[in-house]
Amino acid sequence: QSHASNSNMQICVMFSGQGGNVDDLSLRRFCEDLPCFSDEVHKCYKILSASYPKYESEFMNLAEGKSFPQHGSPLLQIYSIVFQVAMYTSLKALGIKASVVVGHSLGEYCAAFAAGVLSLQDMLIVVFERALLIEQVQYDGKMLRIDLSGEAVQQEYIENCSSLEIACYNSQNHCVVSGLSSEIENLCTRLNEAKVKNQVLLQGKAFHHSNLKQIESNS
């Protein structure tokens, strides 16, 4: 409370992409401990159910913590967004207000909502429509987080790999590579042999990759 009431404190809230996914246990605990969090979760899924009645049962199961979306599912993107929206509104209810909001990847939509650029309903619909379009992309891809700069990875590891692209420059010494699953797996082996720390991300898709241009041609 003392921090929240400090009028001189500037607070920045950053919304993450899918790399910051939480599990169903985390959602249930927040719902149990924070009524405002639970209320916002149910509000979001009711909005989505009204717009997408085909998915109503899945949305309600997510709201009740009865299921967790599979990796690569459009529901996983919504799950991540709803969790972050509920967390943000709970912080506001507790008197913690952001001076600045920023977002990475999927989190940019949350930031647009928090900044008042998009209404809650519009933001949820945009995110789910985007997720449904991405699901239609025919591409067996993965993403790999690497503890090296994007420049080093480009020059030393992926320059001659046709499908691999730098998806995200996370920091000076961290990046994410996106591409075909087979080439990602080969890259992972090479990095392990060189003792470079890396981790395959669990999104189930090659996001931030040129393969997503299929969406334009399919539209």
Image (cartoon, rainbow, N blue to C red):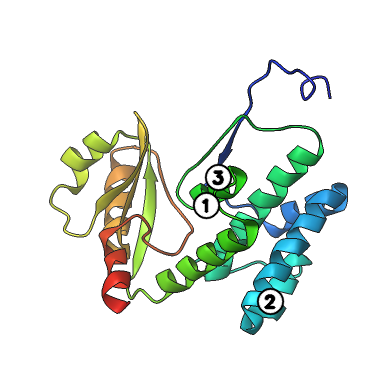
Is 10 positioned to the left or the right of 174 in the image?
right
Q: Quadrant of the N terminus?
A: top right
Q: Among all residues in the image, which is located at the extreme left?
A: 160
In this view, the residue in front, 194 or 138, is 138
According to the picture, the residue beneath numbered tag 3 turns out to be: 111
- Mark with earlier residue (2, 1): 2
User: Residue 22: x percent and y percent?
Assistant: 64, 52
Judge by depth and name the residue closer to the eye, 125 or 3: 125
* Kind of residue indicated by mark 3: Ala
Q: CA distance from mark 2 to mark 3?
A: 23 Å
Amino acid bearing label 1: Tyr
Point 59% across, 50% down: residue: 113
Mark 1 surroundings within 10 Å by alpha-carbon count, few (fewer than 14), some (14 through 19), many (20 or more): many
Can you say whether 33 is above or below 133 in the image? above
Q: Which quarter of the rendering shows the C terminus?
A: bottom left
Secondary structure type for disc 2: helix
